[in-house]
Amino acid sequence: MSWTKKYLLRPERVRKVPRSFSWIDHRLIRDGHLLRLQPHEILLYFFLVLVGDREGLSYYALRSISSYLKLSPQEIELARTSLCERGLIAHREPLYQVLSLPEEVGVSRSSSQVPRGGQARSIGEILQGLLKKTPHE
């Protein structure tokens, strides 16, 4: 196995944890959750992580989320429903809560399953595609 030696590319720009912060559990990748999400679901999940408080709570209105993510309210609602069904978030107007990730979901990284929606893509590719969209396209 080949290891890449890590080093700081921009030491003067090392990020520091501010008083208000967000984090994303590495199990989102490791346990295969991200592979099963559609682009609009990933975008909504990351947004809710970003705006959530220490307990994962936030209360952005559908219209505001739609404006920030450049997705239609219908796309937001579909993403929200899917994320709730998957046990990744909880929602009861006006609150959202990003939940702790469920324990093992039974998908290994070497699985030959293709995620719903087609071929696997990197997060960067997904986010670039979403950011290129015009509002409510």
Image (tube, rainbow, N blue to C red):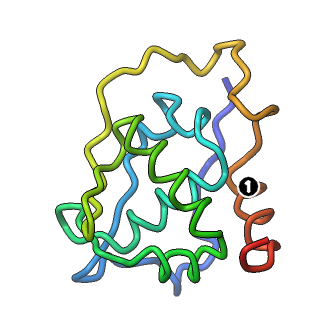
Between 135 and 49, the one nearer to me in the picture? 135
Where is residue 40 drawn, in percent x and y? 62, 56
**Which residue appears at 34% of the width and 37% of the height?**
87
Tell me: 75 left or right of 130: left
Image location of residue 51, percent across then percent down: 36, 74
Q: Quadrant of the C terminus?
A: bottom right
Tell me which residue sits at (22%, 82%) in the image. Answer: 19
Judged from this view, the residue extending furthest toward the bottom is 12
Quadrant of residue 86 within the rendered picture: top left
Percent position (x, y) of residue 70?
66, 76
Nearer to me, 21 or 78: 78
**In the depicted structure, whether residue 20 falls above or below residue 81:** below
Q: From the viewer's side, name the closer residue of 107 and 37.
A: 37
79 relative position to 110: left or right: left
Residue holding disc 1: 126
Residue type indicated by callout 1: Ile
